[in-house]
Amino acid sequence: MDGASVPANPAGAWEDLVTTALLGTDRRTPAVGAPGREAPVALLDAAAVATVRRRAGLRPASAARRPEPAAEDPRPALPPAAERRLALLLADRPGTGGGRRGTSPDLMELLPQWLATANAHGYAAPPQALPALLDAARGRTDLRPAALAFAGPRALWLARLNPDWRFALRAAPGGGAALPDIDDADEVQRLWQEGLFAERVALLAALRARRPAMARELLAATWATERAEDRLMFLDSLRTGLAADDEPFLEQALADRSRNVRATAAELLSALPGSALAARMAVRAAACVAVDHMGDTAAIAVEAPLECDPRMERDGVVTKPPAGRGERSWWLGQLMEAAPLGTWPGRLGGRTPGEIVALPVADGWQGELHAAWCRATVRQRDAEWSRALLGAPSAPEAGGPGAVSLADRAKLLSVLDADERADWVAGFIATHGLSEAFQLLGVCAVPWAGPLGRAVVDALNIARDAGSYPWSFSGVMGLAERCLDPGEASRLEGLLAVPDEGADASPGAGGYWAEAFQRLMTTLRLRAAMAEELEGVVQERRSV
């Protein structure tokens, strides 16, 4: 830049240089530069000098306030082997090319299980892993609860500094704000009266989990002055710890000016079989259903409501049906799902739930009636009715008379305990195969119980031997990689060879099946190693 010069006016010099650069030195000769130098070189030299002058002339800005240190995380550090494993899991990225996956495990799909195990042991996240952990949670909402629990208070500290991680603040109670000690009545009242909406929701949820009555009383004190959309959100928090003591408040909410608030209050009351609303619904529903003895065998006769009167509306019955739905069947369904299930044995001749479900239903009302009983069963968490509506897993119609869809069966299964749920799904798979089992497997506890895991492996083996199109079972195979008990890995060794392909088999199917079983076995062994890395050191630490 020797010899380069610029005019005394820096602003004018810069504008002149920009104009010359835009027009080109062949159309406009630079007004600066040493004699004898080529025009483009002279222009660049002058621009370099002007840039240095512009930067040197900037006044230093005021120093920003240093952020407060992150809160301490008192939890124990990860064992070194587990820390290295976490780095590998976070570094893995799912392929974007599609097609066959090969025999390598999908590490990102194992991250949720690793996080759940680490949280169960109470470990703290390594500070250096937090950015990658937050990035992973940003891209996958299903990871967020476990990832943020593992990341601890430092995740919120980082989220306040990086807009890309603000989701962590939104997911935290009160937007990341600290909640008062629930034993400090003055601070609780102050936050409830003066806090932001997110803080008030978080406070109500925290109180409801530990002091249900206190949360309800707090809400009742300001109920009349809350906005309708806020009342709906606050009312929803009463699902936690719902009990008979909540009935008087919920009865008052039935008269709310907001239809959505009234509907939510009615739903909560119907989940309390001893409530006055449940009794009113039982009377209405019982008037619509009776046993008809006129034919050769007993049957259920249904007479749907002729109108939806104001008292029904007050109790949460929605008057207008959705498109394509008849009014009377719509009203009937709402009455049936809100009535206590204990209504029906006495109303229908002392029969058990299984005997009631087995009765034929006249005039084509069976689907509507059984679907409503499904919804009531899930709402009231009644295991006996769940068994009746599911039926035997080996039933020819695959799912029982009341389960009109896979979604219904999955919801009914959620009412049963984990072992019974797994046994039912195992029986279903043994009879009907895997073609409809994916959604049912999704509600089973992880790792799958032994009988369920063996039923899945056996069904996959049968599908392979039958020459079935292999990619149609990729979803179940992916579930098995995450949910099968790692102890089942040894049972897979006999399935790793490429089978002979029959004339009717899909081309290349045998190689795919061998590859898929190899990946499954490798994944199970990797999961076993992950558990040992976390569990072994925990036991060692406790024994010291």
Image (tube, helix red, strand yellow):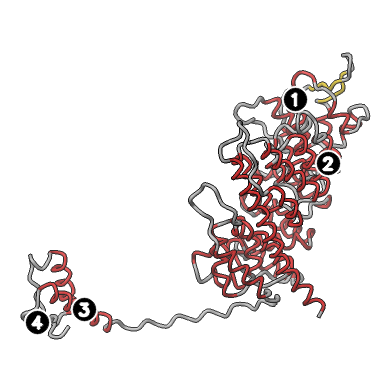
* Kind of element beneath mark 1: loop
The image quarter containing residue 269 is top right
Q: What residue type is labelled 2?
A: Ala
Q: Where is residue 63 in the image (x, y as percent from the top left)?
A: 42, 83
The numbered dot on residue 305 is: 1
Reading the chain from its start, which is encountered first: label 1 or label 2? 2
Q: Label 3: few (<14), some or many (≥20) within 10 Å?
A: some
Q: Where is residue 134 in the image (x, y as percent from the top left)?
A: 56, 65
Query: Looking at the image, which residue sits at the far right?
Result: 350
Q: As drawn, is 433 to the left or to the right of 56?
A: right
- Camera-nearest residue between 113 and 277: 113
Mark 4 lies on residue: 34
Q: What residue type is labelled 1?
A: Pro
Q: Where is residue 156 in the image (x, y as percent from the top left)?
A: 59, 69
Depicted 85 relative to depicted 448: above or below: below
**From the image, which quarter does the N terminus lie in?**
bottom left
Q: Which amino acid does label 4 sit on?
A: Ala
- Camera-nearest residue between 17 and 289: 17
Q: As drawn, is 158 to the left or to the right of 187?
A: left
Mark 3 lies on residue: 48
Mark 2 lies on residue: 276
The mark lying in front, picked from 2 and 4, is 4
